[in-house]
Image (cartoon, helix red, strand yellow):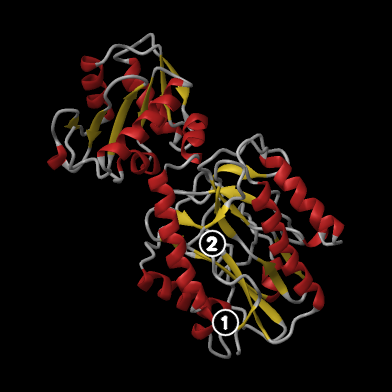
Amino acid sequence: MNRSLILLDHDEYTLRLSRMQQAVASCADAAILSDKATLYWLTGRVFAGFVYVPADGTPLFGLRRCVQFESDGVTAERKIEDFARHVAAAMPAPGQLALEMDSSSYSAVARISAAFAAQWPDTETVNAGAALRAMRAVKTPQQIEMMRRSGLRQEAVYRRIPAIYTPGMTDYELQVEIERESRLEGCLGQFRTAGDEMELFMGNVLTGDNADTPSPYDFAMGGAGMDPSLPVGADGSVIRRGCTVMVDVNGNYTGYMTDMTRTYRLGDIPAEALRAHELSREICRRLAEMGTPGRPAREMYETAFGMAREAGLEHRFMGHRQQAGFVGHGLGIEINEAPVIAPRSRDILAEGMCIALEPKFVIAGVGAVGIENTYVVRADGRPMECITNAPEEIIDLDK
């Protein structure tokens, strides 16, 4: 293998390839992979092309560009049909060939299927989506370290937010300044999501009643946005006294994201908002203690919702006019990886999973309150490790 294509060190690449081949073996005899997030996960590099991964053996790479990487196991292929012929000449026909049917378009899946059916007429195509999702849910120590580095830099930006604010600002103006600080800190700007139910630029800044504006996207908080083409987030509202500002801005500094939300305020806010915010912190602490290997994800959601109900805040929990059906989610290369902390989730926590917990509340006339942190599931029954450690209390913008 040409080491210039694989940016990972040998041990890390060997570990990731082993995990990928285990995932492939759970659903097929081999897989064809082309999704950018998957290619980055395996190689540490994004490139245009395909990888043929047998459940046992050496992968073959076909690149549409970057021909400087051409060597044994890496060839320049302009079309999937050319790559299929190359693979068929080098590999025995698999009984089942897995494709990324969850992240590829119908036309792409159809073309890949047809290309390999022309070489291996008896090979059945199956979906690799669930197996790859489970594989990526558990991070390697190197991936976790990359997320820790993202968390530290995201934390540094959040600590500077009160100094960024100036009187009379709108939510959008504050977001632009936070994004500027983030980029100068090294944020890549990219906000990778899976599926077709999420779109976002660099994050979500909400003040006042805009926090209660429903959005078509599957986020914990909504917002009207600045244009109907992207109906989520800041809408140009002036930040007013007696209102909160919830900041949930991109933490992608290494290709592996952290997710962190903090709440700010301008002047005094009602006791109900303060109580809900403290409950959010308490829920995070309780779920961090619960988040041990073997824990069903749905039990964590049930605990969080139960705490909100006991406090009489269930109708404000995870939204008001429109409530999100989860309280946490996995993340890494994409912001919405497994597991999902939801009432009907079938996910079971495992060591190495990275999870964002975001128990939030919306208080009418005030705005959103609560926090979000990114955690790592650890071994030996220890509470999850928090890797986003900016101050959690509601922070004054005018002091």
Look at the numbered disc 2 and give the secondary structure of its residue. Answer: loop
Q: Residue at x 78, y 62 (%)?
A: 316
User: Residue 326, relative to residue 86: is it above or below?
Assistant: below
Residue 26, placed above or below residue 382 = above
Q: Residue at x 72, y 61 (%)?
A: 282
Q: Check disc 1 and report its element: helix, strand or loop.
A: loop
Query: How far is the residue under mark 1 from the one under mark 2?
Result: 18 Å
Residue 327 visible? The answer is: no
Q: Nearer the viewer, mark 1 or mark 2?
A: 1
Q: For the N terminus, give its image quadrant.
A: top left
Disc 1 residue type (three-letter): Thr
Residue 230: image tag: 2
Q: On screen, 245 above or below 323? A: below
In the drawing, what numbered circle is on residue 339? none
Nearest the camera: 94 or 395? 395
**Image position of 127 (left or right of 62):** right
Lateral position of residue 257 relative to residue 12, left or right: right
What's the mark number on residue 170? 1
Q: Is residue 87 visible?
A: yes
The answer to which of marks 1 and 2 sits earlier in the sequence is 1
136 or 114, nearer to the observer = 136
Q: Position of residue 74 (x, y in %)?
A: 19, 32
Q: Residue at image x 76%, y 61%?
A: 321
Kindly check if marks 1 and 2 are in contact, taking CB atoms under 8 A apart as contact: no
Eyeballing the image, is 288 above or below 243? above
Amino acid type, callout 2: Leu
Number of labels in the image equals: 2
Give the residue drawn at x 47%, y 49%: 332
